[in-house]
């Protein structure tokens, strides 16, 4: 600054103009950085759809633009209505239902763990816990969210499945549980999504104005009444937003479910069976040696599109709930 | 109001039951809160026990663990190649994500007009943060590993991780920039400084500890990410990578390989690997907290 005013002829001289030029250039460069984030989203869309097109139509979109026509590889009817999933099998089958079942089953099971426990934890933290307890409990639970998912996978395969689920299944139902089980996947994914529900729900509950609570106390309500009949309903959109975030995370969860629930595509009502989620299928394929361009390889992207659409829907829904909650208290 | 009507109004309310209900509820939600804590304790205890058993019963020597690379033979397996690869990955990821991430955040906080384009960019950022990590792996696989023929090399893995942590770095940088009071900016503008001069001389020096803390935390998350690396193909190699263009297997992918083996020896190798990985994350988190406490000045 000072150096430039010294060298320039005056306050409106060349120095100030040069500064303005630099400022404009920097602004354009930084805008370029920002555009990279937009390009990332577009690239994800493009890459997934381009490769998935090859799975269904035998040629990528880009190849089709150049005039290539592929043979129809997999029909939409087979993909969406078939009930056997084995693209890399000697007699391949392309019904996506079993792995979608795997993902949905793990997600629903995990929600049964994380939603009640997370909500209860949030009510305890926001309404009952003293400041001292909250200051210790909240960061402790957030460690759960910071542990890498591979460690949860290890926890499942080395402890939850063989030490907890195995003996219980054997004692109660006489079922011999293998290395992997659906129940173990539900449990570990449930545990790892608890802090998401508890943290965000607690933020929503703490944002409820004290006037509402005091009004209820003045009418003689107990803390239980205030928590369940005033605070929870008043913060419900924020609480729902946390549920949806947890569900979205469970759908996209990869390492924990691979090591917990296994790699056998299977529609089953037995929680002790091994299943395969969409993400576990991708991991299994990546570990295999299928050549680039084969139907097996392209199936990765067809499953990827489906996964991306599922999580995108959840994210948009989450966004909608969040905005509704912000409107209520602003 | 007379005493009789009071009685008539409140006879159907059993105060004792109301209080019991309150206490039962407190008991339930307290138990639920402890569930998460107990699970965390179990997880850490399980890893610690397996670590200890691995060293005592399976004779995994820590010295050899750090000086040998992965191997098909359990008694010859070590973690050196994976550790070196992970450190390489972190450095590359930091280089690739830091400047672009911080640049985007500066644009969004300091320059961006409040219009539809900006809101669209912000919404897109929120969505990117929710994309499953495996999808970033698919992107890198199709676009870089096979698309431009990079092959399953370190740079490809670093690109996937950099794209993954970019939204985290941008959001934490935005928060750090927002924490700089407008008074400082206005003071600078009043002297005739341009926006960029203000950012470079006034805003960034005040915000840099917050930006560094956010970046280190984001990298601590990236070091444990497994799925994108597996999609990129970082699982077939055991040795130390020779540079950013060499094939590799990092700490989390090596742990995954071991955990998938049926042999108990490999399971315990995985536990020792997890302890090393968690130690790395612990140190990185410690550095982040230190930077925040040491350099964050009250403004």
Image: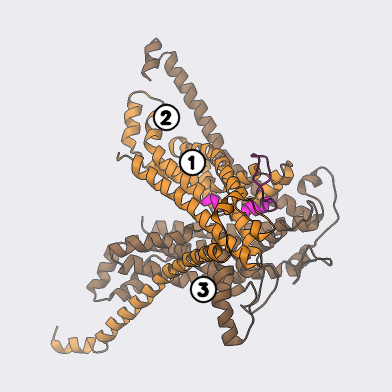
Chain colours: A brown, B orange
As helix, strand or loop, the secondary structure at mark 1 comes to: loop
> Residue at coordinates 76% horizontally, 48% vertically from top-left?
A61
> Where residue B19 appears, x then y in whole percent?
27, 81
- For label 1, the crowd category at 10 Å Cα-Cα, with few meaning under 14, some 14 to 19 and many 20 or more, is few
Please state which of residues A276 and B92 is positioned toward the viewer in this rendering: B92
Residue hosting label 2: B200
Please state which of residues B121 and B293 is positioned toward the viewer in this rendering: B293
As displayed, is residue A200 above or below residue B144?
below
Judge left or right: residue B149 versus residue B165. Answer: right
> Residue at coordinates 34% horizontally, 45% vertically from top-left?
B293
> Where residue B233 appears, x then y in whole percent?
69, 51
Same chain for the residues under marks 2 and 3 in the image: no
Residue hosting label 1: B115
Answer whether residue B236 is magenta in the image: yes
Residue hosting label 3: A112
Magenta-tinted stretch: B221-248
């Amino acid at each position: 600054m000072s150096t430039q005013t010294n060298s320039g002829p005056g306050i409106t001289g060349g120095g100030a103009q040069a500064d303005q030029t630099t400022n404009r250039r920097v602004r354009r460069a930084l805008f370029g950085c920002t555009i990279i984030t937009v390009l990332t989203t577009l690239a994800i869309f493009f890459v997934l759809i381009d490769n998935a097109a090859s799975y269904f139509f035998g040629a990528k979109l880009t190849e089709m633009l150049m005039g290539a026509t592929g043979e129809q590889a997999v029909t939409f009817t087979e993909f969406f209505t078939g009930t056997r999933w084995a693209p890399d099998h000697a007699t391949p089958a392309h019904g996506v239902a079993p792995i979608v079942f795997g993902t949905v089953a793990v997600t629903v099971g995990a929600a049964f763990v994380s939603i009640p426990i997370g909500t209860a934890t949030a009510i305890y933290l926001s309404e009952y816990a003293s400041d001292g307890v909250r200051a210790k409990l909240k960061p402790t639970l957030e460690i759960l969210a910071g542990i890498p998912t591979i460690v949860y996978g290890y926890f499942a395969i080395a402890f939850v499945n063989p030490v907890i689920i195995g003996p219980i299944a054997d004692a109660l139902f006489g079922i011999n549980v293998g290395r992997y089980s659906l129940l173990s996947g539900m449990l570990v994914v449930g545990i790892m999504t608890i802090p998401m529900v508890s943290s965000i729900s607690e933020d929503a509950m703490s944002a409820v104005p004290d006037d509402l609570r005091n009004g209820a106390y003045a009418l003689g309500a107990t803390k239980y009444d205030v928590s369940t009949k005033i605070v929870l309903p008043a913060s419900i959109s924020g609480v729902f937003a946390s549920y949806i975030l947890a569900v979205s995370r469970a759908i996209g969860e990869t390492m924990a479910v691979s090591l917990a629930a296994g790699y056998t595509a299977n529609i089953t009502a037995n929680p002790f069976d091994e299943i395969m989620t969409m993400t576990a299928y991708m991991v299994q394929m990546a570990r295999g040696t299928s050549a680039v361009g084969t139907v097996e390889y392209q199936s990765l992207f067809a499953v990827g599109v489906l996964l991306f659409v599922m999580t995108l829907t959840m994210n948009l829904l989450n966004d909608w709930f969040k905005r509704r909650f912000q409107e209520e208290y602003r | 109001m007379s005493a009789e009507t009071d009685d008539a109004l409140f006879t159907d309310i059993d105060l004792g039951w109301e209080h019991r209900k309150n206490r039962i509820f407190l008991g339930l939600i307290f138990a639920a809160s402890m569930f998460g804590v107990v699970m965390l304790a179990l997880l850490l205890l399980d890893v610690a026990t397996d670590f200890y058993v691995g060293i005592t019963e399976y004779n995994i020597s820590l010295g050899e663990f750090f000086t040998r690379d992965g191997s098909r033979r359990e008694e010859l397996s070590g973690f050196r190649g994976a550790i070196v690869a992970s450190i390489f990955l972190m450095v590359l990821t930091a280089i690739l994500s830091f400047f672009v991430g911080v640049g985007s955040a500066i644009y969004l906080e300091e320059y961006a007009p409040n219009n539809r384009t900006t809101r669209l960019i912000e919404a897109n950022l929120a969505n990117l943060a929710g994309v499953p990590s495996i999808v970033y792996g698919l992107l890198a696989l199709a676009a870089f590993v096979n698309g431009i023929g990079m092959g399953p090399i370190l740079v490809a893995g670093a690109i996937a991780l950099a794209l993954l942590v970019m939204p985290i770095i941008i959001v934490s940088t935005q928060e750090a920039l927002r924490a700089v009071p407008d008074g400082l900016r206005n003071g600078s503008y009043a002297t005739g400084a341009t926006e960029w001069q203000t950012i470079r001389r006034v805003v960034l020096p005040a915000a840099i500890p917050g930006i560094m803390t956010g970046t280190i935390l984001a990298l601590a998350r990236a070091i444990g990410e497994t799925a994108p690396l597996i999609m990129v193909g970082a699982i077939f190699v055991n040795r130390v990578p020779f540079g950013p263009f060499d094939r590799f297997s990092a700490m989390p992918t090596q742990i995954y390989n071991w955990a998938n083996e049926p042999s108990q020896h490999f399971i315990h190798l995985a536990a020792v690997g997890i302890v090393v990985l968690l130690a790395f994350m612990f140190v990185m988190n410690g550095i982040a907290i230190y930077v925040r406490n040491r350099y964050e000045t009250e403004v």
